[in-house]
């Protein structure tokens, strides 16, 4: 009973699985194939993609300095390989190094990626991968530290990460996605002249509910900490560390949130990383997607489940989907205050929004 899938899958004809229609083995086989395909590949697009301006994400220290971090979703216990691609360069020399760490609970794995370009206008992407033990956790922290070769400095221009899709066939037995279970479909038992069991129907409904709950990144951003540069220009190593005054009108991404999300008790989660909080006097509230979120913890990620109460964007009419403004609201008086500076007051150092 091979739990295989085809790429791309052949989709089910919706007109053949409605009331009064004869259920053909073709539709059942395609539906089983599609379930396996979605479990293996669903969500293996970018879980992180952030670009940086020139001379911002720079480091001239010859020992590793932690500079940014993000929250990313974990797709399933079987997805254990995270691919990371970095675009960067070392001025006048090659072989700076970026260390990528993936933290799941109390477990940390890391890999080091060499930065091979010696100048700004070259085209190399340097890649690495991390292999983790299977986990039923929903999220992980992805962190980057950078060091430069002696007498040079490293500039990071962009970072991208995605989970590696599973190969066909899937493993036998039940597979874990967070606290939920997925049952792979053996295509050999869905052919012509074979019994169509009630078990297949129950497993299909349960599998659909499991797959609908898989995390999907709607917005992912980190400020840059501890940048350092010896370049003789005033803007060098002066990156955005915090969500600030000029960000509010554009600090969001249009994101589709699919029908049934609220009805099926699925949630949109917001993660806010704040720094410079040492007492209750440093606590603040930030507005995200029409939700006022109290920020009280420093260094760690503050986690929230939010309600979808904001109005949809006009893009909803163009795409026939519910499209929302996923990001910081433009009425954040806390952020907009020009008296707040990362050097002396609490601030937002990271913001990640994960939907389904």
Image: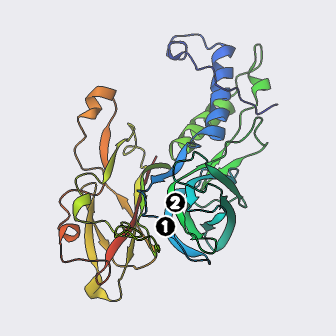
229 to 266, vertically: above or below: below
316 to 107, vertically: above or below: above
Decide: marks 1, 2 in contact (CB < 8 A)? yes
The x, y position of residue 120, in whole percent, is: 51, 53
| Relative side of 248 to 65, left or right | left
Task: Give 183 or 114, whichever is nearer the viewer.
Answer: 114
Q: Which mark is residue 58?
A: 1
Can residue 83 be seen here? Answer: no
Q: Name the residue at 42% across, 59% down.
A: 221
Task: Give 20 or 37, whichever is nearer the viewer.
Answer: 37
The x, y position of residue 35, in whole percent, is: 63, 33
Which numbered disc, 1 or 2, marks the residue that appears first in the sequence?
1
Q: Which residue position is annotated with label 2?
A: 156
Image quarter hosting the N terminus: top right
The x, y position of residue 122, in whole percent, is: 56, 47
Q: How many marks?
A: 2
Can residue 335 be seen here? Answer: yes
The x, y position of residue 83, in whole percent, is: 65, 51
Q: Which mark is residue 213?
A: none
Q: Name the residue at 67% across, 63% down.
A: 95
Instruction: Specify the quadrant of the image occupied by residue 208.
Output: top right
Label 2 crowd (10 A; few <14 / some 14-19 / many >=20) = many
Under circle 1, the secondary element is strand
| Relative side of 316 to 41, left or right | left
Q: Residue furthest bottom?
A: 279
Task: Give 282 or 195, whichever is nearer the viewer.
Answer: 282
201 to 60, vertically: above or below: above
Cα separation, mark 1 vs mark 2, equals: 6 Å
Label 1 crowd (10 A; few <14 / some 14-19 / many >=20) = many
Q: Name the residue at 69% across, 41% down.
A: 183
């Amino acid at each position: 009973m091979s739990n295989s899938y085809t790429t791309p899958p052949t989709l089910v004809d919706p007109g053949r699985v409605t009331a009064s229609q004869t259920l053909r083995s073709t539709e059942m086989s395609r539906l089983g194939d599609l379930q396996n395909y979605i479990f293996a590949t669903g969500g293996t697009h970018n879980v992180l993609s952030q670009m940086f301006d020139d001379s911002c994400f720079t480091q001239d220290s010859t020992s590793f300095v932690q500079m940014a971090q993000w929250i990313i979703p974990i797709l399933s216990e079987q997805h254990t390989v995270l691919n990371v691609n970095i675009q960067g360069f070392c001025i006048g020399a090659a072989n700076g190094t970026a260390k990528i760490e993936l933290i799941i609970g109390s477990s940390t794995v890391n890999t080091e990626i060499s930065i091979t370009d010696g100048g700004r206008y070259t085209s190399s992407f340097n890649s690495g991968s991390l292999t983790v033990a299977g986990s039923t956790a929903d999220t992980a922290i992805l962190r980057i530290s950078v060091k430069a070769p002696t007498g040079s400095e490293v500039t990071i221009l962009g970072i991208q990460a995605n989970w590696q899709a599973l190969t066909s066939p899937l493993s036998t037995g039940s597979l874990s996605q967070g606290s939920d279970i997925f049952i792979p479909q053996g295509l050999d038992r869905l052919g012509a002249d074979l019994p169509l069991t009630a078990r297949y129907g129950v497993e299909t409904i349960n599998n659909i509910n499991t797959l609908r709950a898989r995390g999907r990144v709607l917005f992912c951003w980190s400020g840059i900490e501890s940048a350092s540069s010896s370049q003789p220009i005033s803007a060098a190593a002066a990156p955005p560390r915090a969500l600030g005054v000029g960000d509010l009108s554009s600090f969001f991404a249009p994101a589709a949130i699919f029908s049934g999300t609220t009805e099926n008790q699925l949630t949109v989660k917001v993660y806010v990383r704040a720094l410079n909080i040492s007492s209750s006097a440093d606590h603040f509230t930030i507005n995200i997607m029409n939700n006022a979120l109290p920020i009280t913890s420093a260094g760690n990620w503050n986690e929230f489940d939010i309600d979808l109460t904001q109005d949809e964007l006009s893009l909803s009419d163009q795409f026939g989907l519910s499209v929302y403004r996923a990001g910081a609201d433009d009425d954040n008086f806390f952020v907009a205050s020009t008296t707040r500076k990362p050097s002396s007051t609490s601030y937002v150092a990271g913001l990640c929004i994960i939907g389904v």
